[in-house]
Amino acid sequence: MTRSNNTSNQNGNKTINKKQLKIWFVIPLIVFAGFVVMLYMRLGQPTEIVTNTALERPVPAFELPLLSDTSRIMTNDNLPDQPFLLNIWGSWCPTCIIEHPFLMQLEERGVNLVGVNYKDEIGDALSYLNRGGDPFSMSIQDLSGQFALDLGLTGAPETFIVDGEGVIRQHIIGEINESNWQSRITPCLMVLNEANERNVSPDATQVKEACK
């Protein structure tokens, strides 16, 4: 009886082991099949990540402190009434440090830059400007980062070109340099400045072509 029982147990264990092996063999097949189905469902679908920006819309409403004097609250009414660049920056941002000397050059050329100091400690931000110079006509402090998110920020630095009516016409992701200044930003600003001088809204067709 003992040998019979042992043999029976061994056969039973073998059967269980075979079933377990089958299960472990089937699971990867199921996962793989699911992956194939998912890829099939994605065929023909757009693969680019679309950022929800404020492009072609007015600068989002804000009430934020002036970086140089946080007792003063700035709003949209304090923005320039002529085309300008709205630059998102932070003292903690390595690419902002690379970009900063070129912003100083733009300020010397008479370009109007408004800064948005993004998620930065005020002491660090002011020290940053003291060291490298301040290219901005004003900087507002966006400590929570909500205003930058409303603009559609993906990561500092980024720059928004705004027309004389307060509408965002161009969004530059990453640093501004001589290359994209000449190839992208200057043509856009020329169209916006011309419309502003004539006191009319920029022509939509011209904006679409120049500010792409």
Image (cartoon, helix red, strand yellow):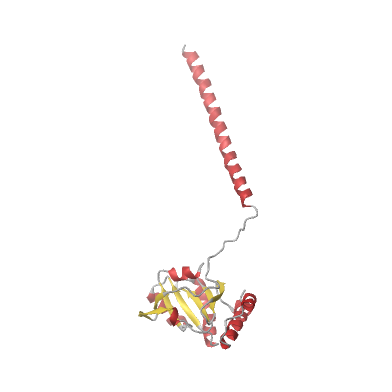
> Foreground residue, 111 or 190?
190
Q: x, y (%) of residue 107?
A: 52, 85
Q: Residue at x 51, y 79 (%)?
A: 166
Q: Residue at x 59, y 81 (%)?
A: 202
Location of the C terminus (image quadrant): bottom right
Q: x, y (%) of residue 161?
A: 54, 77
Q: x, y (%) of residue 111?
A: 54, 85
> Foreground residue, 182 or 20?
182
Number of marks in the image? 0
Please identify the quarter of the rendering in which residue 72 is found. Answer: bottom left
> Foreground residue, 85 or 27?
85
Residue furthest top in the image: 1
In the shown orientation, is residue 209 left or right of residue 64?
right
Residue furthest front in the image: 200
Please identify the quarter of the rendering in which residue 119 is found. Answer: bottom left
Q: x, y (%) of residue 133?
A: 46, 83
Q: Is residue 179 above or below residue 31?
A: below
Q: Is residue 163 above or below residue 55?
A: below
Please identify the quarter of the rendering in which residue 129 is found. Answer: bottom left
